[in-house]
Structure formats: C-alpha cells, structure tokens
Amino acid sequence: MTDLDLKVTRKGRGALTNREGRFEKAQSQAFDDGWGTLEDHLAELPPIKTTVSEDATRSIVTRNQSPDIPFEQSINPYRGCEHGCIYCYARPTHAYWGLSPGLDFETRLFKKTNAAELLEKELRRKSYEPKPITVGANTDPYQPVEREHRVTREVLTVLSRFQHPVALITKSALVLRDLDLLAPMAEKGLAQVFVSVTTLRPELARIMEPRAAAPHRRLETLRALSEAGIPTGVMSAPMIPALNDHELEAILTAGAEAGAAYGGYVFLRLPLELRELFREWLETHFPDRAEHVMSLIKQSRGGKEYQAEFGKRMRGTGHFAHLLSQRFRLVAQKLNLNKSRNKLRTDLFKPPPRAGDQLSLFEEP
C-alpha cells in the first residue's frame, strides 16, 4: 500500500485514490490496524506534485470513424490532465501505461515533445487529405502545464503555416494566449473554439474540476474569443443527474450571452475504472444524494453504469435522458444556437516551402 492508495481529499486534486488499472495483477487496499494509524497517516500526507515526462510517440494524428463524434481527426498534445476533473472519460487510458486512472492521471503527465515535428511530417505526405483536426478531444490542450511546455502552441503554429483547419476544445482561459494565431486563422475560416462549462457554481467546480478555470473565467474567455472574431461554442458537459443537470439551460444561456453560436451537451460517461473513481468521489462529497445520482445514471444506461454502444454512450437512454434531450433542444432553439454549422475550410490547405526547396516556375509571386 502507498500514500496514493488511501481514500482522502487532497487540495487541488480530483480523484481520492490511486486505484490500480485494469491490467495490473496486484491490488492494494488501505487497512487500519485498530490503533488509529491510518487516520494519523492521512493527516500527515504531503501534497502530490505534478511530474511531466516525455512521450516518445511516433504518430500524432488520431483518426476515428465513430458516428457519435463530429470529427475524423484529432490531436492530444498531452497524456493525462492536471485539471483533475473527476468525470473525465479519458482517465482509463492511463492504465495502458501501467499507471492509475486515479491520481496518476492528474499528477503523472506526458508531453508529446515532438508533436509539431510529427504533424508537419504528416501534413507533407503526398497522400494526406486535409480534414479539420480537433485539438483536445481527450485531454485539455491548455491544461496548466501548457504554460511552460507550449506543445499546443507549437501544434497551432504548424497548422497556421499550412493553413489547415482546426477546432479546439478547452476549459482554460490560457487559449487566449494564442489569439495571435487563432484570430487570423478564424478570419480565413480555419479555426473555431469550444469552451466546456460544466457548472456555474464555483463551489461545485472547485471539487469536481479543481485545477480548471473558474466558471466565470470560462465565460469571459468565450466572450474574448467571440469579440476577436473566432466562432465559438459552449459545451455543457458532462451533465450529471441530480448534481448539475438542472444547470443545463443556465449554462447554455450564459454561453450564448458571451457570444457562443453553438451549443452541446454530453451525458455523464463512466467507462472502466472511472465508475469506481466517480462513485467514491460522489460518496465522499455528496453522501446525501450519492445513491440517487447513481440510480438515475443506471436508469439512463439500461440498468448499467455505462453503455459503450454508438448512439447511446453520449446521450443515454430512458426517460431521464430523453427529458434532458428535449430540454436541450428547446433551450437551443430559444437561444438560436446551432442555427448554422460553421464548416471549416479545407481548400486553403497548402504546405509551405521548406528551406532549400526549388520554387516552381509557375509559382505565383
């Protein structure tokens, strides 16, 4: 048993434990010997520091054919996410590296140092077909460590040089740092940004997504992006029954008032290890409603805690999920959200010449 295996709330962290991933043979469990040693140990636990290691990945563009996802190509500059959102569906991916989807996911991060180099190589392939790339599909591209490591910035720089369309998903105000790249791209129809707003209540955000920007900062970010001429959307995701689902209309309204032209929502997803991580978090922070929340989740997942089937995993099924869908449809219609789709341009894509390349005799000046 290690310090990270103990169930305890740590300031600035979302998960309560560091439970082993599904591929690990050995499992640990906290144990009190009757002398109060466990409680003493919990009181003395030091803060957990974030570490960032290099990810020697050989490819950077991920492709999917899921009918539930509105994009075919994506890039994730980091593995793991310091925001610590307890509901993050990407947590189970840390198990592939022999790490815990719990505290490891938000404290032991990996940066794709050669992301820009790999991306440029991919875009220069003769067979490459330009399609919009979504940055931040799994983990937030503007999580706190991006301030220092700037992997996302380097990726955007490449996309800008190639005039390649990009969509960003974030819950961080750090995206405003890159307005110098995004605004000119948006003017050409090459960029859009979606900001995720899970709750408007600071007290809930603080424990549910401890190192993400405060709700009011996200709305300010939406406004600043919109005023800079960048098409924006607000994502009320995930919606959690009896916890934040009653805020759906308020979130979308606040987003629209901040300039968002698009809106969306996702029903809470609890794949693999995330089920237990979320349940223990829920029982610790909301013991009065934990069973009710889980009951509504099961009612919306065919009696289970999660459905992985296409067409069901993002929206859920059953009466509660149907009502949520109807509520979204009505408020989106009222706010004039999603009236038109901002289709990013691909016809401007053009690999820039490299140093030493021979210019064509027919190159336009």
Image (cartoon, helix red, strand yellow):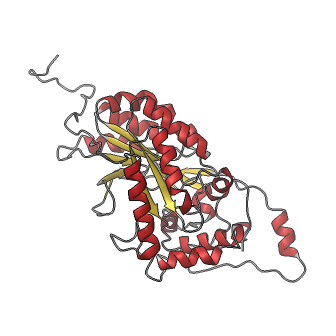
Q: Nearer the viewer, residue 205 or 127?
A: 205
| Residue 18: x %, y % from top left | 64, 68
Furthest-left residue in view?
A: 362
Whether residue 222 sits left or right of residue 349 in the image: it is right
- The number of numbered badges drawn on the structure is 0
Whether residue 331 sits left or right of residue 121 in the image: it is right
| Residue depicted at x 73% and y 71% | 6
Answer yes or no: is residue 9 visible.
yes
In the image, is residue 188 above or below residue 169? Answer: above
| Residue 59: x %, y % from top left | 35, 52
Furthest-top residue in view?
A: 365
In the image, is residue 337 above or below residue 268? Answer: above
Q: Looking at the figure, which quarter contains the C terminus?
A: top left
| Residue 208: x %, y % from top left | 62, 58
Q: Nearer the viewer, residue 104 or 324?
A: 324
| Quadrant housing residue 44 | bottom right
Furthest-right residue in view?
A: 35
| Residue depicted at x 66% and y 73% | 289
Answer yes or no: is residue 60 visible.
no
Q: Nearer the viewer, residue 37 or 315?
A: 315
In the image, is residue 306 above or below residue 119? Answer: below
Q: Nearer the viewer, residue 225 or 61?
A: 225
| Residue depicted at x 48% and y 40% | 257
Whether residue 131 sits left or right of residue 193 in the image: it is left
Q: Looking at the figure, which quarter contains the N terminus?
A: bottom right
| Residue 147: x %, y % from top left | 56, 38
